Image: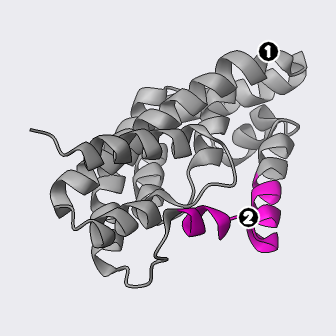
Amino acid sequence: MIDPLLIYLAILIFGINVIPAFMPPTWVVLAFFYATFRLPLFPTVVTGAVAATSGRIVLAYIARYHFRPLLPKETRENYNIIGKFFHTHHHITLPLLLLYAFFPLPSNQVYIIAGLANADIKIIAISFLFGRLISYTFWVTTAHHFSRRLSDLFGSYLTGGAIIGELVGFAVIFALGFVNWRKVFRRFFSEKIF
């Protein structure tokens, strides 16, 4: 029998990861549930990693099918170049994605860019899933400072610094669309990649 708290946790984590901004990190919510409700570590981490990855996949598809069509053609082409680079340079992108996934950094910008760039979401999702399984285990078991209420976790991420950080992240996503990535990649890679 599956613990109803794990089902609630999965729904909550999925929702947090579909919403592109102003949400607490998944590992903080997992640590809260682990400590407060004394959930077993392995099911908590697996539930969190799978739900978070699923939510981010949905976020990437929202970016691809709802935001991308609103962009000018030249901007879409610039994002396409990023997607082609990810697709043709797995030896670079896979280790970088896996390394990024080990740290407790937000992944919303990565998935939004992947969606806008028509990148292969499967590769990104698999890298993040494996990385998050390991990083969530570490962060959940080592986190010692929690709020006593779940609502406080959400409210603490609506501070001035968090809002500025989110806005800077979206500005970076927006700015990437104006870079001529074809020229950049041709300049820094000897082979003709596109």
Counting residues from the N terminus, which is met first, the one under dot 1 or under dot 2?
Answer: 1
Residue 148 higher or lower than 153, as above or below: below
The residue under the point 32% across, 70% down is 36
Indicate the secondary structure of the residue bearing disc 2.
Answer: loop
Label at residue 69: 1
Residue 15 coordinates in the image, percent (x, y) = 52, 39
Viewer-closest of 143 and 72: 143
Q: Is residue 136 left or right of residue 174?
A: left
Residue 71 in sight = yes
Instruction: Tell me if 76 is positioned left or right of 58 in this view.
Output: right
Q: Which residue, as the protein is rendered here, is positioned at the far bottom?
A: 144
Q: Looking at the image, can residue 192 be seen?
A: no
Which residue is at a point 54% across and 35% down the rendered structure image? 86
In the image, 28 versus 63, the foreground residue is 28
- In the drawing, what numbered circle is on residue 158? 2
Dots 1, 2 in contact, CB < 8 A = no
Q: Amino acid at mark 1?
A: Pro
The part of the chain drawn in magenta is 151-169
Instruction: Please name the residue shown 19% across and 52% down the image.
Output: 43
Using the image, tell me which numbered label, if any, was put on residue 135.
none
Residue 119: percent from left, percent from top: 56, 27
Mark 1 residue element? helix
- Residues 23 and 183: in front is 23
Residue ID at (75%, 57%): 166
